[in-house]
């Protein structure tokens, strides 16, 4: 069935990447008029969402949609495709961009941040990269958009232009470009030399056909390069750019470091695992469980580090590092349920984690507090924000009926199908750790005694432009927990 | 001896001699203003006139095209023989494209002896086109040497504080290379009995002869590339040279070395080339890493770009000696791309220097805030230089790496760090230019790019994306010639075997 799909040249794919790109240009050109500028951001985001949604019926009908941008060399081109896997990421990213535009307008104006035009331009460019990555038809195109994301998000990370943000930005660039150029580029060239193509396979099983003369070890090394090379996936030990990048303004942390950038990393990783190497080859070369155990280290260690962080954004950052590896772990189980659980987590984590970051930003704008220990009792004055935080925390922990539960359910099933007790234990330990670092924030927020220093302040909820988006994302986390089929039908279409 | 045929076209002669004619006219122009306009007009017209080379080029054949032959010194069988193939075509076009930009970037930069400067530029153009078109070794050598003097003058008269030192160093290095070339020339003449370059190719020379000729070629061309460890003249020359000098040096002159490998070393001494490949490969890998590391340590913008050239040219030699189609075509692409990108970077550095009277990165820190157009151009060219996908350099490096992997997978592991370094030094430069640190110098009095400066950089910007996104028009012309070159080199082992059987070609 899968191979029988016909390929159609579809102009909508071009529109999908042009929307954020043109949007970035318009934002830059209208910098002097903030309302017009934000208007263009909204327009670009809504257009993008519209285009992506319009692709849904065709993708579910198993049409293969593609659009060739440029041909470079024989079998080497910049080409876009839309399949079910792209839709999981593209839908989540484009929908959340719309909300983030409003949220970030509220945040940036509320704090009177400088260089808002540059900020919004780069934001749109980062989405351009993320959507391009989601819609890539081959490894080269993916590499192009992956690098675009790296370069275009530097100005966002270094936004404050102080010592700390320059340091964070430097680390960010060094980690991401070094791994991409040092591991992905050579791996990509070698795959091209060995197989004569970089086009992703049409199903998740076969992968690109490697010739027999490419020995077992060469393929294994290439696989290793790809797992570590897409360092945006936050796998330890190449994760430390992520916490450093938290010097960025919170909307950046929210959309980019919970949705776009890190998801570009995990999406690229699983795309390569499934469509370059393929489940069958991973199984044959026995790469599945070793990968699962390798990322288990990240899941556990990052959770433990998260426990030790008092800065809310830092705790969320390490939580992200930990949760990203769920996606890779699920795919590495190589069982249908495992793959489903991993891939659905791309969307589930996006909605829940962006809620948490939105809340962190709202708390900061309303109270200028960054540390968890100072947030005691704030839940009583900011009930919506803390309720949303609680809901999203439950999702991160994996409690029913919030989105994260679906992930956990499938992952646990996948681990049992794979017959791996070790992975089962990792998932259980991770759940306990998630509870340990999220529950106190919620508990103290609602039931803690306000600090004496807060006595004279009358805190209230942040601007509605911020509170409404975070409420929406929290409710969506709940909704896709109750109706997991919304994203699950895409994932199931792959199997 | 194969008699070179003439096609009756005199386009190449026209391209070679019209800059000289323009130089003669320039000698009689009094006004500085008119001198600039005249040289600009002349070089632009030459660039336009060179376009039929591309449109009239037959991509199906590896034979030399637009050939011209005339007896020059019949007693010595020295001919005036010109012709281009898929290897030289793009280099000729690159030369004619770069020259008007050199005039433009010198518009205000050069304030004294303008007439002499413009004459030097025009003579350079003649000689450079001549080198790429000459099919007679003596003619080639004449053009090769003729480039030296105007270049040394460009550095020595219009250069920076240490211009005499730099000029002399450049002269001595290149001159010593030329001596070896001359020796090889005479040795080949004695074996072949002709100076016609195609006659020298594919002959069953003995291994010993090939070794010596290859080494003589190698020293001469390696200095020109420059390959590690023959590179030390380059940073000095670049730093002291005026912008136009640096641009010509980077965009065209460095290509002469790699062109020499492609035109002489590989087809004439294929056995020796194959024999010495591991050594040349090793030097290329060292050049890539060394150039990158040294560039990373520079605070002088021109030195940074100069050392990046060493690294980039390492890719070119790597591709050439991988001796497969991907590698060779990639090498030619790297040569063209380096001409476009590094030329553009030197022009950008020149623009910065005209404003700050300093090339220190620290002085330029945070300029992008006040000069966004400059920062945008610098950004694109820096990304191109680090081989960002979608830009010209990416295609070249990708092909060279693919060729390299076909040659040896293990060796390419050693290249990977060099690729990373390119990103490191270029992004560092870009970060400094655009952001700097929390304590940036005051740039509030500086002006952003003017119209002339935008016009200078814009054509190169077009080529960055044109080659990067649609390389087919550029790779198309080289296929046949590269295939032919590969056949010539592939005969290496068999030719050596045949050498015993065949009577050696010796001229009486």
Image: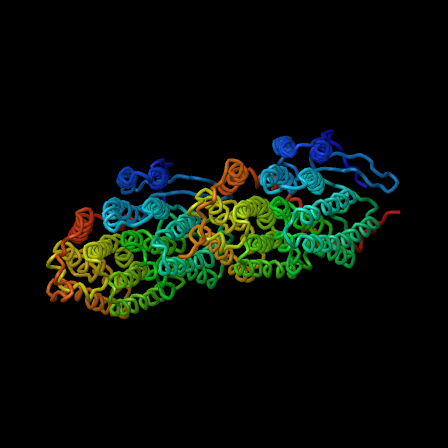
User: In the image, is B129 to the left or to the right of B293?
Assistant: right
Q: Position of residue A4 (x, y in %)?
A: 35, 42
From the viewer's side, name the closer residue of B257 and A359: A359
Foreground pick, B316 / B127: B127
Q: Residue furthest front?
A: B445
Residue B50: percent from left, percent from top: 64, 33
- Residue B384 in percent (x, y) is at 50, 47
Residue A64 appearing in the image: no
Whether residue B270 can be seen here: yes
Give how far across and how far down residue B140 sits, in percent. Answer: 75, 44
Q: How many marks?
A: 0
Q: Is residue B462 left or right of residue A365?
A: right
Task: Identify the image's colour scheme: rainbow, by chain, secondary structure or one colour.
Answer: rainbow
Residue that lies at the very extreme toward the top in this rendered image: B8
Most foreground residue, B115 or A53: B115
The picture quadrant where one finds residue B70 is: top right
Q: Is residue B58 left or right of residue A218?
A: right
Q: Quadrant of the N terminus of chain A?
A: top left
């Amino acid at each position: 069935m899968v191979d029988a799909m016909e390929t159609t040249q579809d102009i909508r794919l071009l529109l999908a990447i042009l929307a954020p790109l043109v949007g970035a240009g318009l934002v830059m050109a209208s910098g002097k008029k903030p309302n017009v500028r934000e208007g263009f951001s909204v327009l670009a985001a809504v257009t993008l969402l519209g285009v992506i949604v319009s692709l849904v019926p065709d993708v579910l009908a198993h049409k293969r949609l593609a659009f060739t941008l440029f041909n470079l060399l024989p079998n080497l081109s910049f080409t876009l495709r839309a399949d079910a896997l792209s839709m999981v990421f593209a839908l989540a990213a484009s929908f959340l961009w719309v909300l983030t535009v409003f949220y970030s307008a509220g945040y940036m104006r509320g704090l009177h941040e400088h260089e808002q035009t540059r900020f919004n331009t780069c934001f749109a460019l980062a989405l351009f990269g993320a959507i391009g990555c989601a819609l890539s038809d081959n490894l080269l195109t993916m590499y192009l958009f992956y690098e675009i994301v790296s370069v275009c998000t530097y100005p966002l990370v270094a936004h404050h232009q102080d010592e700390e943000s320059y340091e964070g930005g430097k680390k960010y660039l060094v980690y991401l470009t070094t791994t991409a150029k040092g591991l992905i580029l050579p791996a990509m060239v070698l795959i091209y030399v060995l197989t004569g193509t970089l086009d992703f396979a049409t199903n998740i099983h076969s992968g690109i056909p490697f010739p027999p003369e490419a020995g077992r070890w060469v393929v294994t090394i290439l696989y290793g390069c790809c797992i570590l090379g897409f360092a945006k996936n936050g796998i330890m030990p190449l994760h430390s750019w992520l916490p450093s990048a938290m010097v960025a303004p919170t909307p950046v942390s929210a959309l980019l470091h919970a949705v776009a950038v890190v998801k570009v990393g995990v999406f690229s990783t699983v795309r390569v695992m499934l469509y370059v190497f393929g489940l069958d080859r991973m199984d044959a070369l026995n790469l599945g469980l070793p990968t699962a155990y390798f990322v288990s280290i990240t899941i556990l260690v990052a959770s433990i580090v998260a426990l030790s962080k008092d800065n809310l954004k830092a705790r969320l950052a390490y939580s992200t590092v930990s949760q990203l590896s769920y996606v890779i772990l699920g795919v590495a189980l190589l069982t249908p349920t495992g793959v489903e659980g991993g891939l659905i987590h791309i969307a589930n984590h996006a909605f829940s984690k962006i809620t948490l970051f939105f809340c962190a930003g709202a708390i900061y704008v309303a109270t200028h507090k960054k540390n968890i220990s100072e947030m005691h009792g704030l839940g009583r004055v900011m009930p919506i924000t803390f309720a949303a935080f609680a809901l999203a925390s439950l999702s991160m922990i994996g409690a029913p009926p919030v989105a994260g539960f679906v992930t956990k359910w499938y992952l646990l099933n996948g681990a049992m199908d794979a017959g791996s007790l070790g992975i089962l234990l990792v998932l259980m330990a991770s759940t306990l750790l998630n509870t340990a670092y999220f529950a106190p924030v919620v508990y103290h927020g609602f039931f803690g005694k306000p600090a004496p220093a807060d006595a004279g302040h009358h805190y209230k909820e942040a601007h509605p432009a911020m509170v409404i988006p975070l409420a929406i994302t929290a409710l969506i986390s709940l909704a896709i927990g109750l109706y997991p089929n919304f994203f699950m039908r895409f994932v199931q279409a792959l199997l | 001896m194969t008699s070179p045929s003439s096609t009756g076209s005199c386009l190449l002669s026209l391209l070679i001699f019209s800059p000289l004619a323009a130089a003669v006219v320039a000698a009689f122009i009094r006004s500085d203003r008119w001198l600039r306009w005249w040289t600009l007009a002349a070089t632009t017209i030459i660039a336009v006139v060179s376009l039929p080379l591309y449109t009239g080029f037959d991509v199906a054949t590896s034979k030399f095209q637009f050939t011209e032959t005339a007896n020059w010194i019949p007693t010595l069988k020295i001919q005036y023989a010109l012709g281009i193939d898929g290897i030289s075509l793009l280099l000729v076009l690159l030369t004619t494209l770069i020259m008007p930009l050199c005039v433009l970037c010198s518009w205000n930069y050069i304030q004294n002896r303008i007439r002499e400067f413009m004459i030097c530029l025009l003579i350079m153009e003649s000689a450079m086109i001549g080198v790429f078109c000459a099919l007679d070794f003596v003619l080639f050598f004449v053009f090769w040497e003729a480039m030296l003097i105007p270049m040394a003058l460009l550095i020595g008269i219009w250069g920076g504080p240490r211009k005499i030192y730099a000029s002399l160093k450049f002269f001595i290095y290149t001159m010593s290379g030329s001596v070896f070339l001359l020796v090889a020339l005479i040795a080949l003449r004695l074996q072949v009995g002709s100076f016609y370059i195609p006659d020298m190719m594919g002959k069953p020379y003995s291994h010993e002869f090939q070794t010596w000729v290859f080494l003589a070629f190698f020293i001469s061309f390696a200095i020109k590339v420059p390959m590690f460890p023959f590179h030390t003249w380059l940073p000095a020359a670049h730093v002291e040279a005026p912008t136009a000098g640096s641009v010509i040096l980077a965009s065209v002159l460095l290509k002469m070395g790699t062109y020499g490998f492609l035109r002489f070393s590989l087809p004439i001494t294929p056995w020796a080339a194959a024999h010495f490949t591991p050594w040349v490969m090793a030097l290329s890998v060292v050049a890539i890493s060394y150039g990158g590391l040294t560039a990373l340590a520079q605070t002088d913008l021109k030195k940074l770009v100069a050392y990046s050239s060493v690294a980039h040219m390492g890719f070119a030699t790597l591709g050439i000696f991988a001796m497969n189609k991907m590698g060779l075509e990639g090498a030619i692409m790297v040569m063209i791309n380096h001409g476009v990108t590094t030329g553009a970077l030197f022009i950008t550095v020149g623009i910065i220097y005209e404003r700050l009277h300093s090339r220190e990165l620290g002085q330029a820190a945070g300029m992008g805030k006040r000069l966004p157009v400059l920062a945008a151009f610098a950004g694109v060219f820096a990304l191109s230089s680090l081989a960002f996908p979608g830009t010209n350099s990416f295609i070249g490096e990708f092909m060279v790496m693919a060729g390299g992997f076909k040659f040896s997978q293990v060796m390419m592991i050693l290249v990977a760090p060099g690729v990373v370094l390119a990103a490191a030094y270029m992004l560092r430069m870009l970060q400094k230019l655009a952001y700097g640190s929390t304590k940036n110098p005051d740039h509030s009095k500086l002006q952003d790019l003017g119209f002339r400066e935008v016009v200078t950089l814009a054509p190169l910007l077009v080529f960055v994306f044109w080659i990067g996104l649609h390389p087919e028009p550029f790779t198309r012309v080289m296929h046949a010639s590269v295939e032919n070159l590969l056949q010539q080199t592939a005969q290496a082992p068999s030719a050596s075997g045949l050498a015993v059987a065949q009577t050696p070609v010796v001229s009486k």
